[in-house]
Image (cartoon, rainbow, N blue to C red):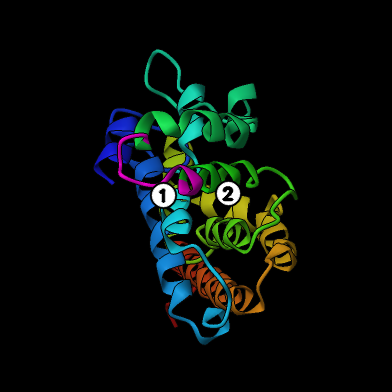
Amino acid sequence: MQKYYYIFRDTYEAGGGYGFRYDHGVRVMRYCEKFLALPYFKNKKIDQDALLVAALFSDVGKIKSVNAKGELRYGTKADQLHAEIGSRIVTKYIGRSGLSQATVKKIQAIIKQQHGKTAVSVEAKMVKDADRLDNYGCLQIWRHITYANYDKLGLDRLYEYWVTEGARESAKNSLRKFYFPVVRTIANTRFTRFNNLLRHVRMESQAEDIA
């Protein structure tokens, strides 16, 4: 975690601000830790070391999309290919961690499989689902607010992006992409919770909660 912190400590991004990419990696790792304790995964053969290290470093390739100002730029070639890049550069950071060569190779494979629909191993699918899960829930309010601030927009931007511009429908449709039903259920609960949160924010901003 310390090594990963130093990679992204001085970077920022539109949707999340400073420290977001590090925090995201830690959450993805912790989600995978929690998955391991669920009955659904109890009887599956899982390389826990490879899973957790790959989860933490799953976005390490995005460091190549950071510009001279320290901003992680979305949509760049490096951003789009971060899984492929990450699988190549991760050994730079974990090479002396005491992990076996076989485990390191598995970590590289898990990270590489995060791009598109290429997840094959159960570990890669778990990391992918953990990454998707982090796009759901009330924590997203922070990304929405930092996005609005980055674009110099006001409070109404939250509702417009979520409802008018179709982000809510996109998030709802993306629920079907989860590999594991147990994780999809968690994401669905988070989706409902966040939708309710933004609904209440909208009500208060419009004074609709005053009888």
43 to the left or right of 171: left
**Decide: marks 2, 1 in contact (CB < 8 A)?**
no
In this rendering, the answer to whether 127 lies above or below 147 is below
Q: Earlier in the sequence, mark 2 or mark 1?
A: 1
Tag shown at residue 203: none
Image coords of residue 165 (percent x, y): 69, 49
Q: Camera-side residue: 95 or 56? A: 95
Q: What residue is shown with label 1?
A: 56
Please tell me whether residue 102 belongs to the stretch shown in magenta.
yes
Residue 151 shows in the view: no
Q: Camera-side residue: 139 or 102? A: 102
Image coords of residue 22 (percent x, y): 35, 43
Q: Camera-side residue: 119 or 11? A: 119
- Point out the residue furthest to the left here: 2
- Say which residue appears at 53% left-offset and 33% top-offset: 86
Q: Amino acid at mark 1?
A: Leu
Question: Callout 1: few (<14), some (14-19), or many (20+) C-alpha neighbours within 10 Å?
Answer: many
Q: State the SS at label 2.
A: helix
Q: What residue is shown with label 2?
A: 110
- Say which residue appears at 58% left-offset and 49% top-offset: 110
Please tell me whether residue 55 belongs to the stretch shown in magenta.
no
Q: Amino acid at mark 2?
A: Ile
User: Which stretch appears magenta?
Assistant: 95-103
- The quadrant where residue 112 appears: top right
